[in-house]
Amino acid sequence: MRVYPVSQILAYLRDVVAMDESLQSIWIEGEISGFRQTAAGHCYFTLKDGAAQMTCAWFVRHIPRNLPLPRDGQQVLVHGRVEVYEARGALQLIARAVRAAGTGLDIRRLEELRARLAEQGLFAPSRKRALPRFPRRVGLVTSPDGAAHRDIETVIRRRYPAAEIIFSPATVQGDDAPAQIVRALERLDSVPELDVIIVSRGGGAVEDLSAFNDESVAWAIFWATVPVISGIGHEVDYTIADLVADHRAATPSVAAEMAVPDRAALLAEISYLARRLSAVTRVTVDTAGRRVRDRVAHLERRSPLRIIAAQRLRCHEMRDRTGRSMEMRLARSRLELTNVRGRLEALGPRQVLTRGFSIVTDAASGRTVRRPQDTGPGRDLVIRLGQGAIRARTLDETAWKIDSE
């Protein structure tokens, strides 16, 4: 058998309750009993019905100002989250809003509208648009007389004076408020180069937010051509406009801060980037300088001038060797030519004639006469000697008449 300490059991129950999402935003109806308010402004009471009761804590940050507090015996609707209070071993409700029970019908209608719009995709995270980082024109839908108007303009001009505020006034409370908000959004849709829209109102009671729970306002925000920021000014309750908007801000001032960047932060970022760029540039230049110096040292070690000089000397030597080789070959060729010429001259006909030989040719035909049958009586002959020639005429085959040329 395993034994558990009380603290472990209560811690386990605390985690179980905390992980149940349905208990983190829930409406509970009951009768108030033992209502009390502390000096710090916090309220504590018991919520009960005929069969059970639950302790409730209502902290000052969630209590609306200048509104009457509930009283014992009053039937109310309490919105909040359930948690386990370990110190007392009790289940308690952390209240965020307390309303008279007569508003229950309105709450059910609102929940039905919220469910229907959710089913139609108006709240889908996938359709939420990102905010521009540097908006040039900011559209503003709010009451011209409300504090939200002043707060938003003050914040935008302080944070980002470059942005132009396009104000589209609308009543944000009362029966005419939904129609005026829709028309204000439609006017902004026709403004050229608009970057973002803020739909806002100041604080007030939960009942004053009905205009932002209107279906026509939800669809107007859905069809807006630029991202929409809701700054309804109520930290506890989410209106339908908050759920449809691309981004939700708890207050008008926070909505303005979301819409535009902070000039001081931008200047600090630019200064940081400039310093970083300077450092990166310095490192890059130093690295490049080292590479250049390494290359210069490498080139100096290899001494390109000496290499070029050596190549030039080698070229000169090759040219000289080539020249000498050609001269030697020419000399050998000349000698061979002289020898061949000598041999040719020694064996040539002229050289033979100088040794007493002669060449006899027929004067008319130029044919060489090698035997008597090659000529006949009365034929003119030419006899070539080692020096000169003799013209002769045959008398017969055995007798010659010789005439000197």
Image (tube, helix red, strand yellow):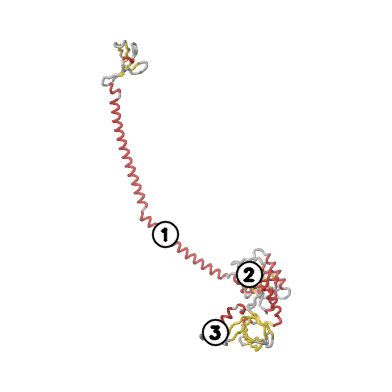
Q: Is residue 239 above or below residue 403?
A: below
Q: Quadrant of the C terminus?
A: top left
Does residue 305 appear left or right of residue 134 in this picture? left
Residue at the far right in the pictured view: 175
CA gap, disc 3 to disc 1?
A: 69 Å
Which residue does the numbered mark 2 point to in the structure image?
124
> Whole-percent x and y of residue 167?
67, 69
> Which structural element holds mark 2?
loop
Q: Which one is earlier in the sequence, the residue at label 1 or at label 2?
A: 2
According to the picture, the residue beneath numbered tag 3 turns out to be 9
- In three-dimensional space, the C-alpha distance between marks 1 and 2, rounded to whole angstroms, equals 56 Å
Please state the horizontal and vertical placement of residue 74, each as a whole percent of the image: 69, 86
Residue situated in front as seen by the camera: 346 or 80: 80
Vertical placement of residue 61 versus 194, above or below: below
Task: Give the label, 1 or 2, closer to the camera.
Answer: 2
Residue at 30% of width from left, 35% of height from top? 332
Q: Give the residue type at disc 3.
A: Ile
Tell me if residue 65 can be seen: no
Tell me the number on the disc at residue 291.
Answer: 1
Q: Quick check: 380 above or below 99? A: above
Give the quadrant of residue 336.
top left
